Amino acid sequence: MPVAQENLDSEMPFYAHFAELRSRLIKSLIAVAAGAVVCFSFSPALYALLAEPLKAALTGPSQSLVFLSPVEPFFVYLKLSLLSGILLTLPFVFYQIWRFIAPGLYAHEKKALVPLVACSTLGFLLGAVFCYFAVLPLGLNALMGMGMTEEFSANAQISMASYYTLVMRLILAFGVVFEMPIFSYFLTRLGVITHETLVRHWRIAVVIIFIIAAFLTPPDVITQVALGLPMCLLYVVSIFVAKMAGRHKQAE
């Protein structure tokens, strides 16, 4: 009986930690779902906004997207409302993330929760904006230019689902990538990594970065490089951020 009780006591912290994670995840999903419902009526505006990079890359009748099934426009609007819901509830979602991480932080770091949420939200939005204004026009011009030449003499017929799935994937990918320095700081504070670890494994990191870029982007070199290079730059920034975090940890 004492042995069984001891085992139960040793397992409780894990179960409590798992319950906390589940609670934060459920709250975040409910918030995103509620945001998506609120933003559904704004899906046409987001649809028109995200179509601008494609229209700029196309000419003539090819500027019009096509749909291949009667339900495709409805599901595209659902996806766009989900994207809007994620962007709308970013502060709340990041609040849940940092509240989950908070038990491993110092007391004064826990008090900096509002700046943490603000920086995380700003980083994600910067990644999304960079994707929309820099990566999408560059990648679409390159991809469309390959097919719409005199040699091919072809018109693009792009479906709504394929285009908006690609755009959403890229926007979310760039948003997450731009969080790299922030998470690097706190992984260092938690003792998971050090800046020496990041420096020592930079070659492996570059390979992994471009593998991730190839997986997340269309099969063209320009878009892959457009994602890979900012990730490499953010990795370098993360090294300096981790070094700063390590110094603060030693001082405390």
Image (cartoon, rainbow, N blue to C red):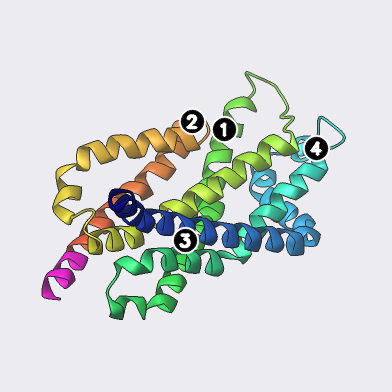
Residue type at tag 1: Leu
Residue 9 within the segment the image draws in magenta: no
Q: Which residue is mark 4?
A: 72
Determine the CA span between mark 3 and mark 4: 38 Å
Q: What span is in magenta?
A: 244-252
Left or right of 105 in this view: 31: right
Which dot, 3 or 4, sits closer to the camera? 3
Question: What residue is shown at x 47% (from left), y 39% (from top)?
Answer: 223
Left or right of 18 in this view: 82: right
Q: Position of residue 73 (x, y in %)?
A: 81, 42
Earlier in the chain: of badge 2 and badge 1, it is: 1
Residue type at tag 3: Glu
Earlier in the chain: of badge 1 and badge 4, it is: 4
Q: Which residue is mark 2?
A: 220
Left or right of 203 in this view: 150: right
Q: Position of residue 55 (x, y in %)?
A: 70, 45
Which dot, 1 or 3, sits closer to the camera? 3
Question: What residue is shown at x 24% (from left), y 36% (from top)?
Answer: 204
Earlier in the chain: of badge 1 and badge 3, it is: 3
Residue type at tag 2: Asp
Query: Mark number for residue 124?
Result: none
Earlier in the chain: of badge 3 and badge 4, it is: 3
**Extreme residue toward the front, this view:** 1
Q: Position of residue 11 (x, y in %)?
A: 35, 52
Residue type at tag 4: Glu
Question: What residue is shown at x 42% (from left), y 54% (from top)?
Answer: 15
Residue 121 in view, yes or no: no
Determine the CA span between mark 2 and mark 1: 7 Å
Q: Which residue is mark 1?
A: 143
Mostly what secondary structure, the magenta segment?
A: helix
